[in-house]
Amino acid sequence: MLNNAGAYFGDARVATAENIEMTFMLSVQVPYILTTELLPLLEKAAGRVIHTSSFMHHFAQTRVLDFGLEQSYSAAMAYNNAKLYTIWLAIAQAEALEKQGSSVTVNAYHPGLIATNLGNDGVKRNLRSRILTRLMKPFSKDLDQGIETGYYLSLSPEVAGVSGRYFAEKKVARVSLKGFDVAKSQALLDYLDKKIQVFKESYGD
């Protein structure tokens, strides 16, 4: 299962009815829900779960845990933090599944700089952002190139049984020193579970 949905929103914080910041919702909450709900099927197939992260996780700001970015918000912070949380999620899920004796593996990966319309999801983009996007476009991968590591993690026998890792260019890559903290990752899981409970109370199981 390759989780690869996301958006880069504008200057104003956008949230769901449950007050989940939208970048976090798409990049972290939804993959967590899907993995949790589909786990019985993944178990039957010795499945692999791949979360799409980014090199930008190195620029995350998590000194103060504010998963919903209610205290301070910027589109860049929302994106960078979500990509770091994606790695925390992959490691935490991998460890939990291993303890359960599960054959399901969970990894995260950086697809590279891809020429997409991701930034267009924002309500407005400043001039510097637009200029930077144009300057970087010649150095960007196309979608087929960007998904190669995702396909590799999904299908290659070379990574069968490998779990809890972060990949780039089909190789295990260095994770930010902020990449995994047991207490913080547990706080992330608690936050995700709390929001799922809110969903259930609002809409039923």
Image (tube, rainbow, N blue to C red):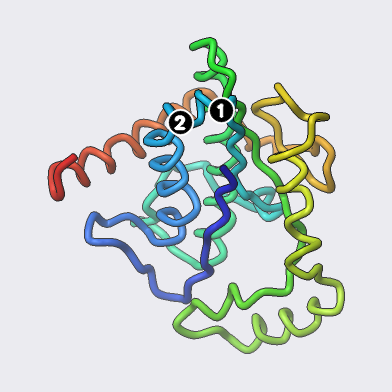
Q: Amino acid at mark 2?
A: Leu
Contact check, label 2 and label 1, Cβ < 8 Å: yes
- Residue 71: image quadrant is bottom left
Say if residue 100 shows up in the picture: yes
Residue for point 55% across, 84% down: 125
Residue for point 52% across, 41% down: 63
Q: Is residue 55 left or right of residue 104?
A: right
Q: Which residue is mark 2?
A: 41
* Label 2 neighbour load within 10 Å: few <14, some 14-19, many 20+: few
User: Residue 40 versus residue 91: which sits nearer the camera?
Assistant: 40
Estimate the x, y position of residue 70 in percent, counting from the top left. 34, 56
Q: Is residue 197 left or right of residue 39?
A: left
- The local secondary structure at tag 1 comes to loop
- Residue 140: image quadrant is bottom right
Tell me the number on the disc at residue 199: none
- Residue 87: image quadrant is top right
Reply above or below: 97 against 180: above
- The local secondary structure at tag 2 comes to helix
Reply above or below: 181 against 24: above
Q: Which residue is mark 1?
A: 45
Q: Amino acid at mark 1?
A: Ala
Outermost residue on the front side: it is 44
User: Residue 70 versus residue 116: which sits nearer the camera?
Assistant: 116
Residue for point 36% across, 68% down: 14
Outermost residue on the bottom side: it is 127
* Label 1 neighbour load within 10 Å: few <14, some 14-19, many 20+: few
Residue for point 50% across, 53% down: 27
Say if residue 92 shows up in the picture: no
Q: CA distance from mark 2 to mark 1?
A: 7 Å
